[in-house]
Image (tube, rainbow, N blue to C red):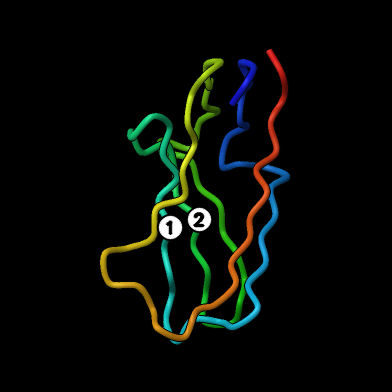
Amino acid sequence: IPRALTLPANFAGSAGHIDTNPTAQFDIDVTDDGVSIGTISIADTGAFTFTTDGGTAKAIGAGSVIRFVAPTTPDDTAASFAATLVGTLD
């Protein structure tokens, strides 16, 4: 992330898409420099739910690395995941 920003509580305004739905709920950990800040859950219907740890906004510093981390044993049917997190510049 090149500039400091704030991600709203539960990543409000964020969106996701998956081409092939998982067979069961699929949870993706969202990390800031290796520390979990929330989860993106994809239901077997393809519906996305975004949550932040504690249900609070997250301040992200300039130079931070945001990653989407799949579970150790991913769902073999889930394919072509995309997510856009919405935030405001500080």
Residue at the extreme left of the image, as rendered: 72
Q: In this view, does 58 lie to the left or right of 12?
A: left
Residue visible at 46% across and 50% down?
Answer: 68
To which residue does mark 1 refer?
A: 28
Mark 2: amino acid: Ile
Query: Horizontal and vertical percent for residue 61?
Result: 52, 16
Residue in front for this viewpoint, 16 or 76: 76
Q: What quarter of the picture does the C terminus occupy?
A: top right
Residue visible at 39% across and 79% down?
Answer: 75
Q: In this view, does 39 lie to the left or right of 80?
A: left
Query: Horizontal and vertical percent for residue 1?
Result: 59, 26
Q: Which disc is residue 40 wearing?
A: 2
Q: Distance between the residues labelled 2 and 1?
A: 5 Å
Tell me which numbered mark, 2 or 1, is placed earlier along the sequence. Answer: 1
Mark 1: amino acid: Ile
**Are the residues tagged 2 and 1 within 8 Å (C-beta)?**
yes
Alpha-carbon neighbours of circle 2 within 10 Å: few (<14), some, or many (≥20)?
many
Residue in front for this viewpoint, 54 or 87: 87
